[in-house]
Image (cartoon, helix red, strand yellow):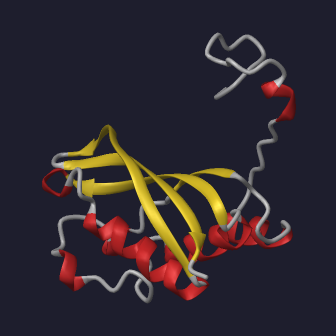
Amino acid sequence: HLLSRKTQGVQCPGAVDRLTFLHGDCLEILPTFPRNHFHRVIAPRRKDGSTDGNQPDDTIDAVSKGGGADFLRELLSVLKHDGGECHWYDFCADHEFPECQRTRRLWGEVCDLHGLKYEVFNVVNVGSVAMRQIRVCVDVRVSSKA
């Protein structure tokens, strides 16, 4: 459904033939891949309920209370650590956009655990999910601290 041989938007000949869509729990699938392997990952974070929403930024400890931290930890282990990029789809309140501090804090805390630094190089509003809640695509590049 998302991508087919007839898709007019595909600009890279043969790209459709090189893509594989995996269906299942990412926390079970990601550990089966080689470490430090992928150049680019498209990652829609699941909505975690009580750790999302209009809570003030200082009330959430992103790493210990969810917010996609478990998913991000696994994702970072398979993403290249020398310029790997992630298109991280997340949620934020409209007043948080475009800074998305909660998302940046999550990335900072999890990258610290992996000995990585991160750079947010683009943030885009990709749609509303509820009143005053939007889905964003936060483009992030990672590299080793060393």
- Position of 32 with respect to 49 (left or right) is right
117 w.r.t. 82: above or below: below
- As drawn, the residue found furthest toward the front would be 146
Q: Position of residue 40 (x, y in %)?
A: 66, 50
96 w.r.t. 69: above or below: above
Q: Position of residue 6 (x, y in %)?
A: 73, 10
- Which of the two residues, 83 or 100, is positioned nearer the viewer here? 83
Q: Residue at x 42, y 68 (%)?
A: 48
Q: Which residue is drawn at 50% across and 76% down?
A: 69
Q: On the image, which quarter does residue 13 sit in?
A: top right
Task: Quarter of the image for the N terminus: give it.
Answer: top right
Q: Which residue is drawn at 75% across and 56% down?
A: 38
Total numbered circles: 0
Q: Which residue is drawn at 33% across and 74% down?
A: 51
Q: On the image, which quarter does residue 59 sit in?
A: bottom left
49 w.r.t. 87: above or below: below
- Position of 135 with respect to 59 (left or right) is right
- Position of 36 with respect to 117 (left or right) is right
81 w.r.t. 39: above or below: below
- Which of the two residues, 40 or 54, is positioned nearer the viewer here? 40
- Which of the two residues, 77 or 144, is positioned nearer the viewer here? 144
Q: On the image, which quarter does residue 20 sit in?
A: top right
- Position of 43 with respect to 79 (left or right) is left
Task: Quarter of the image for the C terminus: give it.
Answer: bottom right
